[in-house]
Amino acid sequence: MRVLAAGDIAQCHSRGTAATGLTPTQFAVLEALFHLGPLCQRDLGHKLLKSSGNVTLVLDNLEREGLVQRQRSTSDRRYVAVHLTEAGRERIA
């Protein structure tokens, strides 16, 4: 029996997400939003173990593709919630 290493699992995951046309991090963002609902960028970064700069770049690209939408809170302008769009929901489903 062969034991899988972390690199083997990551490589399988990358091949699987490549079929969706998404990077592994983009896929993880859509998956988190699909299962957990809207999250702020900071919480997304914590859940995915990614830096704030990386999360911003990933969200910029997903927003450009129309898969997520950022909504600034009316009561606290510092809080920005990230939501799946209908196109994003269809893509991850």
Image (tube, rainbow, N blue to C red):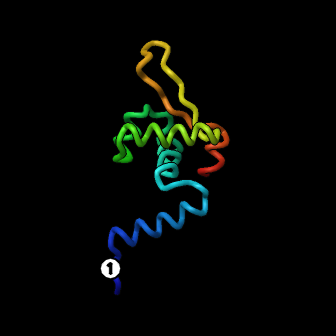
- Please name the amino acid that badge 1 sits on: Val
Quarter of the image where the N terminus is located: bottom left
Residue 19's spot in the image, x, y percent?
A: 60, 63
Local crowd size for mark 1, using a 10 Å CA cut-off: few (<14), some (14–19), many (≥20): few
Residue beneath the point at 55% across and 34% down: 83
Please identify the quarter of the rendering in which residue 78 is found. Answer: top left
Please identify the quarter of the rendering in which residue 88 is found. Answer: top right
Residue beneath the point at 34% across and 47% down: 49
- 30 and 54: which is toward the camera: 54
Residue beneath the point at 45% across and 12% down: 75
Residue 30's spot in the image, x, y percent?
A: 53, 46
Residue beneath the point at 43% across and 31% down: 40
Residue 29 shown left or right of residue 85 in the figure = left
Instruction: Check the image and report above or below for 76 versus 36.
Output: above
Residue 48's spot in the image, x, y percent?
A: 38, 47
Residue 67 shown left or right of residue 25 in the figure = right
The outermost residue toward the top is: 75
Residue 3's spot in the image, x, y percent?
A: 32, 79
Secondary structure of the residue carrying numbered label 1: loop
Instruction: Check the image and report above or below for 68 versus 17.
Output: above
Q: How many marks?
A: 1
Residue bearing the label numbered 1: 3
